[in-house]
Image (spheres, rainbow, N blue to C red):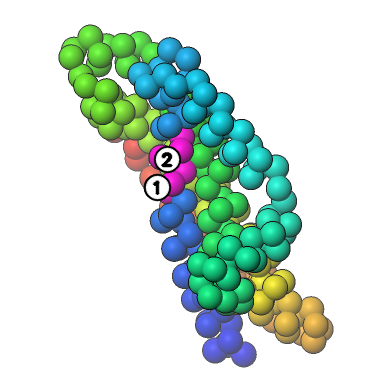
Amino acid sequence: MLAALWTAFVDTLVMVSISSVIVWFAGIGLALILVTTTAGAIFQALTLNRLLGGVINAFRAVPFIILLVALIPLTRFLTGTTIGIWAAIVPITISATPFFARVAEVSLREVSSGVIEAAEALGCERKDVIFRVLLPEAMPGIIGGFTITVVAMIGASAMAGAIGAGGLGDLAIRYGYQRYDTVVMFSVIAILIVLVGGIQLVGDRIVAYLRAR
């Protein structure tokens, strides 16, 4: 049973790690587009802003378990299968990216307009305003939001176990629920608690370090 727990733990780490990398870059990219294309921003494009915001809101409105099933055709097309950790990465990523994009957007909008105007007055190009002013100033908030997103992704990976995605969720359902093995169930719960606590601690430490600089 220890071997099964270890395998499930590694599968969960793989699912969440790969999804997290994609969500980090995609989410920040979407957030930057939302912030820089709004009214009065450096790349003002209101039509694009509204369309992108609508798409993001639409995906955020769909519960993960429904999105999981709705994306089965896309998952099969991209991965060639609908079960296993690679199949789970698709819905987890698509579900988490809009959430993180909105969280990152909030942090980016909190950057003082005075700082941006000062950078522009000093002759900074628009790309420099984004990468040398906007992102560095907002990074503590972005990291904090990403930590929350990763924790939510761990929960989503466990939920994906309901349709055979593998990982700790799959183990808990197959053994803990279907076979009434309470030892497995509580072991999975304990691992998830430690995993989430560790991620939250690391995220909080990084945020505290960035804010102290």
Name the quadrant of the C terminus. Answer: top left
Q: Residue at x 18, y 12 (%)?
A: 122
Residue reaching furthest to the left: 123
- Residue type of the residue flagged with mark 1: Phe
Q: Position of residue 92 (x, y in %)?
A: 57, 59
Along the line of sight, the residue nearer the viewer: 160 or 45: 45
Q: SS of the residue at dot 1? A: helix
Q: Which residue is mark 1?
A: 25
Q: Residue at x 20, y 19 (%)?
A: 124
Q: Is residue 101 above or below residue 8?
A: above
Q: Which residues are magenta?
A: 24-31
Q: Which residue is mark 2?
A: 28
- Residue type of the residue flagged with mark 2: Ile
Question: Is residue 12 found left or right of 141 in the rendered image?
Answer: right
Q: Position of residue 5 (x, y in %)?
A: 58, 82
Crowding at mark 1 (Cα within 10 Å: few <14, some 14-19, many 20+):
few
Question: Is residue 139 found left or right of 131 in the rendered image?
Answer: right
Q: Residue at x 38, y 36 (%)?
A: 139
Verify CB contact (< 8 Å) between mark 2 and mark 1: yes
Q: SS of the residue at dot 2? A: helix
